[in-house]
Amino acid sequence: MSGRIVGIDLGTSNTVVCAVVDGEAIVIPDNEGQKIQPSVVSFLPDGRTIVGRQAKSRMAIDPLNTIYSAKRLIGRPFYAPEINLAISKYAYQIVRGSDDNPKIFLRGRHYSIEEVQAIVLRHVKKIAENYLGEPVTRAVITVPANFNEAQRDATKTAGQLAGLEVLRILNEPTAAALAYGYDQQYRERIAVYDLGGGTFDITILELRDNVFEVLATAGDTFLGGDDFDHRVAQLIVDSFKTEFGYDMNSAPGAMQRLKAVAERVKTTLSDQPVASAMVKQMVPGHNGPSTLDFQLTRERFDQACMDIVQQTFVVCDEALKLAGLTSAEVERLVLVGGSTRIPLVREMVENYFFKQPLINVNPDEVVAVGAAIYGFGLEESYEPSEDSGYAPLTSGDYSRVSGTQSHASAPQGRAPLLIDVTPHALGVATVGGYVDVIISRNASIPTRMTRSFATSVDNQEVVRLNILEGESRVAAENRLLGELVLFDIRPAKRGEVRIDVSFEINADGMLNVTARDTVTNQIQQTRLSLAGGLSAAQVSEMMQHDLPASAF
């Protein structure tokens, strides 16, 4: 291996890139000194794209051609309920592709969600190259702990399309814990409460010196700061309708403009008791635009948004139950994600965990810092002891690394061991509409589990297995992850051919499936079609074409 490895926190609202430079984890600024880049892409009429703050400023000007919150869509099939919800809320056009994946249609072309995310990744890649003065080709990219196989695979594809070799997909809460506890010799249980722009995760970890063991994780990949923005925007719509008798929901692009206004109001209320905004809108039958002088108090904001925060505690209850702990038994609380700056969120989380969160952790930067430090450890390989029971997840000499703003200091000696868990149970649909669970939820990863299946008819040549994700024993109540197809089954009577199907989850949390005939030991040809993911052929085809030129 050669060249520096960067850590990238690819967020719903913002993206941050970090690298270890001269022994220090540096959150990399752009040429204007800004470390946080909005995850927004705007497509210009001349074929170029603009990314980040410039693109965000066009959300109100050109809502049909400006894409935001793409992370909420990535890796989901078009028929997923979250896609239908996005279609009803987002101004840009989300359509069904021929592969049943969502596509974004604008400027006469269809874009996959992976392509849009790749444009954001390429933007921060360029920022890192300008700062470091060298090419950047390798990265550790973080994802919500609750992301499934298709979402992780799609994120890795986005990295490929951006010209990056993605060495590891790392869970965001684990990265945050790494940045907080690296070489601190802590021996404690911590909760990482991660409320970002579009996703929420709660992860309970136990730190033992430089061992970071995830005890449990749970999350909601469609819950975050966007929901606060939409709630405030709806308050503006209600006020406008009361004063002028006109429903702005019916005005093309109005909600996109209001989202930007709502975000500013929300941000102001984090520091001030009252926020104001002037909203102008053309109303049929009126001469000129009608102007609303909108004011929102923090108290009213709290009342309107309290149920959003309460939804996170349902998820927290779930994680604590899996870990076999109560909230009072958690010794440290780490807040991650820009939405944790909201006073209502901080207050309610403090009350839930009976403790104040750490104040020396930057919630916007800590995930990227942890990813960069992890990436730094991948520079060299090490072999764990044979009796450790764990695969080599990290490596390298961290003795020169120190953290910034997130207490991500370097261990002296052996690299830390990260022991993560799978957030969902994985299994296959069986006769009668039930599920045979192969890998249980909260199983430590890497892991490999095997189940034996038999043919159901004489001389069966093909076996199809629906791979499901979820906790219900009823197949229809789980999410379809994909279909495993086994070809060239040897001719035999029903039940005589037994096939061992093995599910293996690697350190990235990504699934690999193999099938073996138990008599001949022949590995069967398999094809895993991911629901919501792109095929290898589609990825290869997209790699042959450049993404739209960016206006850096």
Image (spheres, rainbow, N blue to C red):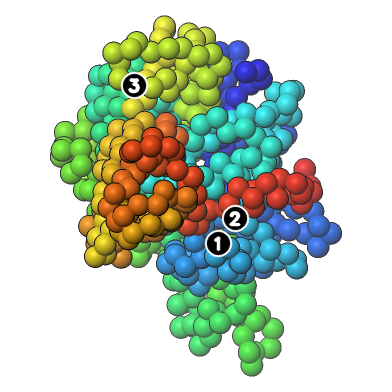
- State the SS at label 1: loop
Which quarter shows the N terminus?
A: top right
Q: Tell which of 483 and 52 is nearer to you.
A: 483
Task: Give the CA distance from mark 2 to mark 1.
Answer: 9 Å
Which residue type carries mark 2?
A: Ile
Tag 3: amino acid? Tyr
**Could you say where residue 402 lies in the image, as x and y percent from the top left?**
49, 15
Q: Is mark 2 in CB contact (under 8 Å) with mark 1?
A: yes
Inter-mark Cα distance, 3 to 1: 36 Å
Q: Earlier in the sequence, mark 2 or mark 3?
A: 2
Residue where numbered disc 3 is placed: 390
Q: Nearer the viewer, mark 2 or mark 3?
A: 3
**Along the horizontal axis of the image, is 188 left or right of 403?**
left
> Mark 3 Cα within 10 Å, few/some/many (few <14, many 20+)?
some
Mark 3 secondary-structure assignment: loop
Q: Which mark is residue 113?
A: 2
Q: Nearer the viewer, mark 2 or mark 1?
A: 1
Q: Residue furthest front?
A: 492
